[in-house]
Image (cartoon, rainbow, N blue to C red):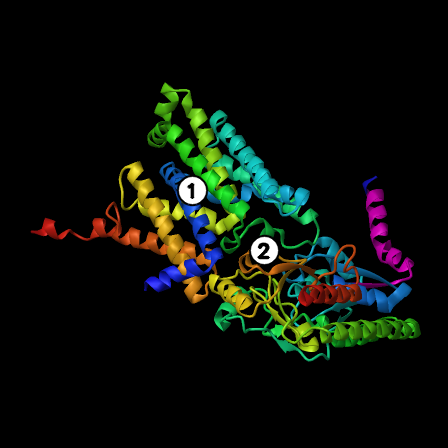
Amino acid sequence: MIDLILTPFLDFAFMRRALLGCIAISIGATPIGVFLMLRRMSLTGDAMAHAILPGAAVGFLVSGLSLGAMTIGGLVAGMAVALLSGVVTRVTALKEDASLAAFYLISLAGGVLIVSLKGSSVDLLHVLFGTVLALNDDALILLCSITTLTWFALALLFRPLVLECADPNFLRSVSRLSAITHFAFLALVVMNLVAGFQALGTLMSVGLMILPAASARFWAQGIGAMIGVAVLVAILSSVVGLLLSYHLSLPSGPSIILVAGGLYAASVILGRQGSLRTRYLPRPHLQS
Amino acid sequence: MNRRIFLGLTTALALLPLSALAQDKLPVVASFSILGDMVANVGGDRVAVTTLVGPDGDGHVYQPTPADAQAVGAAKLLVINGLAFEGWFDRLIEAAEYKGTVVVASEGITPRAMADEEGHAEGEAEADHAGHDHGNVDPHAWQDLGNARLYVANIARGLTEADPAGADVYAANAAAYLAQIDTVEAEVKAAVAALPADRRTIVTSHDAFGYFAAAYGLNFLAPQGVNTEAEASAADVAALITQIKDQSIGAVFVENISDPRLLDQIAAETGAKAGGTLYSDALSAGAPADTYLNMMRHNIVTLTAALQE
């Protein structure tokens, strides 16, 4: 048993790299996912995935398969979409979801246009989005630095962020930090997604951001505890998914996300807070 | 006023086909760059070749553009590879309302089954390739120069039927081109014969060299299936790494059309060196593989250079 778990990681460097990359993104992106969920912005991750495409594509066209150029391009495009949609939300009558949808669609169309103008090239989307089995040193350093940065930023922003989740109007009325918090948070979302896309692929980075957070909602009540549970769920999914991919010859990204999905399903049914079990099954000690 | 514009436009539209004829060359559309080069060689000055999937493009996952549909609609002859290589071609012909002849260049070759020894379970392969159904046939038949002779014969026959007046020219061009193919094939065979028997295994990023391997006695391994769409599993990569270490395979190669990162990682982990770029499904825009024969020559030189050390 222990052999089955340890041998793949002991024998193969690419498995260790994949594990490290997954753990980095689990620790960095999952807390962001928890805040996204609490702010009812869980679909933002998916929208942002499309929004960064034109930036990453321009980066690729300018300097080829260079992690740096594609990251900067993706960050610029993602931040532009986040800022513009944030400004429209705050200044006009349009709600956040609609303005984000509008800007990400514009950005996506721009991205597809740029990709197609390059002509009948390699399927650029495949090049833009990496796979967890091919993490090189640059990608690992990028993932780990962004995770570190995320935690420092969260430490600074924690109080205002919690307030913003609980009651954004209150925070706006008592402090000018509201807007700063909002944009800093969106910047963290974009950073984590951009790092994840290039290193791990779209599915992996959005999946590991949102699914563990949604599962943690059923187990913990405080934000701190929720983040803890979510990070554990994400790391567990990564390890189990990688091992399944190794032993059963399954593609790695989807198996990691499906394990996270399985944990989510189990949480929906069995969780301690507001799950199907607590709502529809009477507890034994209440019967007596 | 409006009527005048309308009349002008309709006249212009009616004259469009004439302007195409005015060039006096046979408009031929080839599905991808390698076929385009062959058609240009056989057709010479009498044909104007349009290639849909250009140099460095991936024919498996290609999306036709309106300009392509226009080129197909205006063509007198279409040349495709067949063997389910161009999955998008039937839809394109229908959309462009093309009614002419389609030459299937691979007609008459002996198809190879898709390489399946890499531990791709059948079910997995089916699922991965859904939508790009190769069936079980490896479409990369042009990698065998013997098959290329049949390609040339099929293309020459198609051109002759479409433009009987040029029959002599096509026959002469085809004969000259076949002679060049003979020369390159002799070079390939000599190069492989010079390799020691235990130095004939190569790792590439996509299973495109099945015909080449079978025809010239080399052994190719690839971490992905025959299609660039499939995502590799950890088991595939691990098996490949173990095999490279066990058989002390010296070199891995990337191709011009696929993502090099996975192979770079495998090379780093096994200590095998990256042997260079091979061209499988598409020519390069400039040197070193700007024509089919240059591509075959470049591939064998690159391979032997890396394997001999």
Disc sitting over residue B209 in the figure: none
The type of residue carrying mark 2 is Asp
Where residue B52 appears, x then y in whole percent?
74, 59
Chain hosting mark 2: B
Disc sitting over residue A29 in the figure: 1
- With respect to residue B284, does B113 lie above or below? below
Viewer-nearest residue: B279 or B90: B279
Chain hosting mark 1: A
- With respect to residue A183, does B297 lie above or below? below
**How crowded is the residue under tag 2: few (<14 C-alpha within 10 Å), some, or many (20+)?**
some
Instruction: Say whether mark 2 and mark 1 are on the same chain.
Output: no
Where residue A108 appears, x then y in whole percent?
58, 43
- Please tell me which residue is depicted at 33% across the width and 62% down the height of the picture: A2
Residue lying at the far left in this picture: please name it: A288
**How crowded is the residue under tag 1: few (<14 C-alpha within 10 Å), some, or many (20+)?**
many
Main SS category, magenta section: helix
Where residue B196 appears, x then y in whole percent?
67, 74
| Magenta segment includes B20 | yes
Q: Would residue A219 appear left or right of B66 to someone viewing this image?
A: left
The residue segment tinted magenta is B3-29
The quarter of the picture where residue B14 lies is bottom right
- Please tell me which residue is depicted at 34% across the width and 45% down the height of the picture: A230
| Magenta segment includes B117 | no
The quarter of the picture where residue B179 lies is bottom right
- Please tell me which residue is depicted at 25% across the width and 53% down the height of the picture: A270
Residue named by callout 2: B264
The type of residue carrying mark 1 is Ala
Instruction: Provide the secondary structure element on which disc 1 rests.
Output: helix
